Structures are given as C-alpha cells and as structure tokens.
Amino acid sequence: MGGTVSHKHTAILDAAYELFGSEGFYETKMSEVAERAGIAKGTVYLYFKSKEELFMAVTRRDCEDFLQRLENLLQACSTLADKLSAIAGHHLLYYYERKQHTKLFFRAPNNNPELMAYMTRFMEEYMQSVMKVMQESGAAEPELLAESYIGMLDRLKMDIMLRPGFSEADAHKRAEFAAGLFIHGALGSQNEQAVHTLHEDHQEEA
Amino acid sequence: MGGTVSHKHTAILDAAYELFGSEGFYETKMSEVAERAGIAKGTVYLYFKSKEELFMAVTRRDCEDFLQRLENLLQACSTLADKLSAIAGHHLLYYYERKQHTKLFFRAPNNNPELMAYMTRFMEEYMQSVMKVMQESGAAEPELLAESYIGMLDRLKMDIMLRPGFSEADAHKRAEFAAGLFIHGALGSQNEQAVHTLHEDHQEEA
Amino acid sequence: MGGTVSHKHTAILDAAYELFGSEGFYETKMSEVAERAGIAKGTVYLYFKSKEELFMAVTRRDCEDFLQRLENLLQACSTLADKLSAIAGHHLLYYYERKQHTKLFFRAPNNNPELMAYMTRFMEEYMQSVMKVMQESGAAEPELLAESYIGMLDRLKMDIMLRPGFSEADAHKRAEFAAGLFIHGALGSQNEQAVHTLHEDHQEEA
Amino acid sequence: MGGTVSHKHTAILDAAYELFGSEGFYETKMSEVAERAGIAKGTVYLYFKSKEELFMAVTRRDCEDFLQRLENLLQACSTLADKLSAIAGHHLLYYYERKQHTKLFFRAPNNNPELMAYMTRFMEEYMQSVMKVMQESGAAEPELLAESYIGMLDRLKMDIMLRPGFSEADAHKRAEFAAGLFIHGALGSQNEQAVHTLHEDHQEEA
DNA sequence: AATGAATGAGAGTTCATTCAT
DNA sequence: AATGAATGAACTCTCATTCAT
C-alpha cells in the first residue's frame, strides 16, 4: 500500500543498515531492527526471509549506491589526475560519511556463500571501474594497479575509524596524497637514486 | 610432563586458531575447540577464562609472531629496495600460508574494548616498523607512506582469499609489483606526462 | 484473551511457588517451572527477567497474601484475647495449609540484597501488625513482646513441618496454647512461687 | 599422621564451618574449602565422601557443641529462674558469637533425608533438655512450653542477624526479657484483667 | 498486511568429583 | 596420604523464527 517499493521495506533497510553498521551482524537483534523501523517483529519477516537475507539486502543496497556514485563522479572528470582524485575522494569521503557503519563490512556472517559471492562481485565491479581509468593511461598491469590504489585508500580509511579527531579536511588531504603517491611513487622522480644510496651507505659500513 | 608452556595450553591455542580463523568467532563453539584440542570442554576453562579471552590470546600470539618474523627479515636487509621487498613478501606470504584463517581478523567480537585496543596497538607497531624503513629513505610523510604501502599489500591479499587458483608464485609476483609501484609510481619516471596526455586527448574530443 | 494480569503470568507464579516451595531455589530448574506451567522454557523469560526475579515475585506474592489475610482477621476481632488468637491461628494455619512449601523461606538464594531487603521489610510489617495489638493492651515493651510471640508461633510451626501425623486440630490447639502462655506466663498466675519452690528444693537437697 | 582425630580433618571442618556458615551450602565451593584449609582439593575427599557429607559433619559438630555447652550450663544452675536464664543466655549468645555463620542453618541442601533426620534429632535433644527444666517446675504441657520458649529465643535472634548495631549487652537484655515473659506472661500477674478491659471498651463502643 | 506471544534449539560456563601420579 | 589437572553433566538464558489472531 506504499510508495515506490513500499515504505516499510525501506524503513527496515534503513534500520538494519544503522544497526548492522554500528553493532555488527551478530550483535544486532531482529527485534531491534523492527523497533527502530517502527514496526512489529513479525512484520520484518514479511519483507525479508531471514536475518541473513536482510543483511544481504542491506549490503547490496549500500554497494550499489557506492558504485553508482563513483560512476557519476568519473563521468564528470577528464584527466587521469582528476579521475584518480575522484576515486580517492569518493572512497574516503564515502567512509568518512559513514564512519559509524564500518562494521557492515567487518562483521558479516560467515559461511554464507551467496554473500561471499556478492562481495566478490562487488569488489570486481569496483575494480573494473578503477581499472578502466588505469587502462586509459596506458599503464601496464592495470589490474594490479587498480587493486593497489584501492588498497592504499582502504588503509587510509583505517585512520577515519581509529582516530576520533579525524576531520573531513584530513580526509581530503589523504585523498590527494594517495593520488600523488600513486602517480609519482614514494620518492618522486627526481631522487629515485635514494634507493641505492641507502644501499651504498650500508655497504660502506660493512 | 608438559612442555615449556604446557602442552594443553598450546593445543587449545592451536585448535582455537584453526577454528576462529576458518569459522570466525561467533560460529566457533567452545565445545568444538575442546574436541579439536582432544580434551574436555571444561578443561578449556582451566587455561582461558572465557571465549573472548581465548580469542584474545589467539590473536595476540598470531600478531606477535607476525611482527617478530618481520623484524627478523628486516634485520637481514640492507637496501631500501630489499626492505620494501621483504615487507611485501612477508605480508603476502604470511597470509598465503594462512589463507584458511583470515576470519581471525574479520569476524572478531565487537564491543570488546580490550581487543580493539590490542588491535590498534598491533597496527601501530606494524606501522612503526614499516615507517622506520620509509624514514631511512629520507622521504617526506613517512607515516602516510607506510600506511599506503601496507594498504596496497592488504588489498593484494584479497586475491589470495578470493581466487582459488592463486599460487605462491603469484603471491611473490604481487609482492615485487607492490614494491616497484611504491618506488616508481604507477607510470614509471619516464612517462609521467601521460597524466596530462590523457587530459589533452579528452580536450580534443570535446 | 488472558485474565486480569495474564493467565500465564499467574500460571508461572503458581508453578514456581509449588517448586521453589517444595524443592528450594537451587534445586528448582527453570525448565521444570516452564513444564509445570505448561509453557515453553523461553516463555518464562517473557514474564520474569531471571530465576532470581521470579523467586522474588513468588515471595512477594506470598508475603503480601499473608499480611493481607492477617489484617482482615484482626479487623474482625475486638478483645486482646481474640486478636492474639487470630494471630496465632493465622500463623499456624497458614503454614499448615502450605506445609509442602516451607522451603520458600528456607532455601532462598543468598547474596541477593534485594531479596534480603524485601524479607526484612516483610518481617517488619508483620511485626508492626502484631505490635499494634500489644500496644492496645498497654503492655510495656510491645516490640519485644511482638517478636517473642511470633517466635513462639514460628517454633510451634516446626512441628507441622517435621511431624507427619500433625492434624489441623493439633494446629488449632497449639494456637490457643500460645495465646494462653503469652497472657498468663508458663505457670499461670496462681502458683508463680513455683519458681522459687524449685530453688528451695534444691537448697534442701544440698 | 596427626593429633587426636587428624589435624586435617579438623582443618577441613573449620574451613567448611566458616564458609557454609557465611555463604551457605550452595555458594560454597569445595575448592574454596580446600584452599581455606590449606590443602589440595582432592584431599578433602579423603576425609569426607561428598560435599553433603561434609555439610552433615559440620552441622553435627556444631550442634553437639551447642548441646554440650547447654548441658554444662544447666548443671551449674539450681532455681528454675536460673535455668531459664541460662537457656536464654546460651541460645542468644551462641548465635551472637556466630553471627557470621547463620547460614549454616538457613541454606542447607534439601532432599537429603539423612540431614533432615539429624536436624530433627538435634531439635528433639535440645527440646528434651529444655523440657526437663519445665517438668521440674511442675508445669503442665512441658513440651509445648519448651518449644515456645525456644521459639521466643530464636526470634529475638533475628535481631542479631538483621540489626548491625546489636551489642552483646543487648543480647543479654533480651535473654532476661524472654525469661521474664515466660514466667509472668506479657501482662504480669497484677493486671491480667487488661485482657478483658480491652474487650469491654469495644463492647461499649458497639 | 500486521502483530507479538510463544517457541525451543543451542550457547557459554560452573564445579563436584575422580584418578594417575 | 596427598595432589590438582581433567572431566562432563547440568544449568541459565538468548533470540531467530513462527503462526494464530
């Protein structure tokens, strides 16, 4: 009797997103989801067959949103630098905005092949989007590059989780750093010999 | 009888490592741990006060081992390139050898402040080790560099988890790639202008 | 459906009263309570948060009933003798009717401050009721008198517990005896000198 | 290899008395008893077959001590008044000295017929001692008198348990009160008509 | 469609007792 | 005689799921 997909369907997903995200799958009770959604416990089961399926649905919605926004951002970029920047910014800001919900990805149920398969598929799609950008730059090994880049960003994301005072500006700065590192390497092109200088120092010592 | 630390203590840790690692904290039953350790359920509680404490002990042992091995490997390296290679190799191989036990880190109990604190400390120690290497190279922002490098490796690790056919040789190749990317950047020093070439291409299209 | 307070709530209290009373707190299993109440184990916890809280509720209901009945009886009495009789009769008959449930008071969980506090409060209320009667008679030390009287009755109650053949008529007889003793003392007013006669006898023997 | 009955036998009984008395039967762990007795857990079972049997032994020793002391006190008395006083003093002081150990009698295991039988026997022996005193005074119903007297004392004992500030002098005062009440009744011989005065007042009101 | 009382399998944990040393 | 590591039955309580209303 509702809106586009049914008001309650959405209310349950919202409530579940909030709770799975902040408490994790196992600590979240179906009764809490129902309460937060403002409906009765039994009603949840009219919309989702089980707790695991609800978790799947929440995850799916969140991942799709993530990929959709990324696609929109990339469409608006023209240079490689812009694109890398957009990817980094999206990745970090997305999690910055959701810093209370990180457990959605950390505390999922095991042994659910369907969920594992979906997560794999999501990772691949994300990777494809990033890889396409790498390919456009003509770099070798675009796949590994894409994975590495995402990895850098994911790690910086840890700070968002663990450091209470981390600001949105900090997140931006990190995004730029990641893009720069990616393009120039750690040492910048001008002093790459440092790699061997260090080497020689040690040899002299020996 | 009994070894240095007690044969059973070790047997329980081993069994718990196996189960927590492959099934996760919540799906692992204390009775299973006991059974796999070849002892009675009650005996587990003679060595570990609770399931959470057992999990902590397993985590601690694994993390300490990880850091110890890394330290040993770094001692044996002289150049920056060697060290980066050692870090990458260790990170990936460590998880390659433990690919069945990734859930030790993914499915931990929430809301356990002691565990959270320990994990943060571990991350910091790992980061310090890597950062020291970065500092020796004279690079600016060694902290961000260290985090980025670890992030790259962590991501490559995902392949180990998700792709069944991933071989040890593949892991080695990835380790070298990560070290190379880190030093030279994605595009290599020789054709950095690609970043802007891409830009111009798009402008011409427009 | 469901009665005034909920049919099941009452059924659980009844079952728990029966079991706590006859087996004691520690020997009573929540599963037994559920079985006797004709419901599932989990259902008990919908009505009572824990075993201890259920015990408290059973105790409270029984104590309130006891005090209420006493109050009703005393309202109907006019002379002191009648009132003492009523108290004695109530005390003994109450336990006579509940002789299977004496363990409600003997086998309660320790270290539960709330329960201890409640029992103290109950004792005080009972004592107040009896003390008011004593005060009306103008006797000195009404509090000590009240406690002593209750003590007498409590002890006679022991016979109810321990002697299988103890009849309701026996209980009545004891009640009258207690009231008489209370008013006249052990020896009756006519031969109080017996206290000293005994003394002299012994002196003569010496 | 020890003294009269074995040093350890006594040490266990002492430890068990302390713990059963202060914590109750169910809350006392055999390991605690062993620890307090300064021996190993298994050793307790060399002296006592089970926890219940240990409890029995503790109870038996305490009861025998109680009765023995009473007998000694009564031997030294000549008048009835002295004897009643001695009984009251013994009863209250005994528990005053043991106020930490009241749970020995309140939290015993159920369903142990041997223990129940022993307690009954103890009660009877105590009763016999007191009854003999009553009989010497030539009073009718010496048994009921004895029980009533013990009852009074038992109740006054409650104050010792529940009122923190209760002093030894208070205990003495109560003992004298109980003896006096017993001999003279609540109202004393001089104004027994109060019983009926109250009656008449109410009749006039009507 | 919506409810929420009822279910019951299943978990972690305790502790009296045993027995190889 | 003494030990204490090991046992495992038995307990309380939780919570995803069902179904009569």
Image: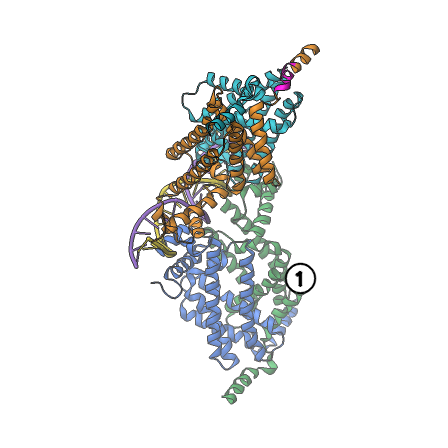
Chain colours: A green, B blue, C cyan, D orange, E purple, F yellow
Q: Which residue type carries mark 1?
A: Gly
Residue at x-position 66% and y-position 15%: D198
Magenta span: chief secondary structure: helix
Badge 1 marks a residue whose secondary structure is: loop
Specify start and end residues of the magenta stretch as a single range: D189-196
Question: From the viewer's perspective, is A157 left or right of D66?
Answer: right
- The image quadrant of residue D173 is top right
Residue D109 location, x and y as percent?
43, 37
Q: In this view, does A102 lie above or below A193?
A: above
Magenta stretch encompasses residue B30? no
A174 and B138: which one is in front? B138
Residue at x-position 49% and y-position 70%: B67
Residue at x-position 46% and y-position 64%: B62
Q: Neighbour class for label 1 at 10 Å: few (<14), some, many (≥20)?
A: few
C122 and A101: which one is in front? C122
Residue A83 location, x and y as percent?
62, 66
Task: Using the rendered image of the protein, determine whether residue C118 is visible from the camera's viewpoint.
Answer: no
Residue at the farthest right position: D205
- The image quadrant of residue B187 is bottom right
Residue C189 location, x and y as percent?
57, 18
Identify the residue under disc 1. A165
Q: Is residue A56 above or below residue D154?
A: below
For mark 1, name the chain: A
Magenta stretch encompasses residue D190? yes
C163 and B58: which one is in front? C163
Task: Using the rendered image of the protein, determine whether residue A96 is visible from the camera's viewpoint.
Answer: yes
C143 and C205: which one is in front? C205
Quadrant in the picture for the N terminus of chain C: top right
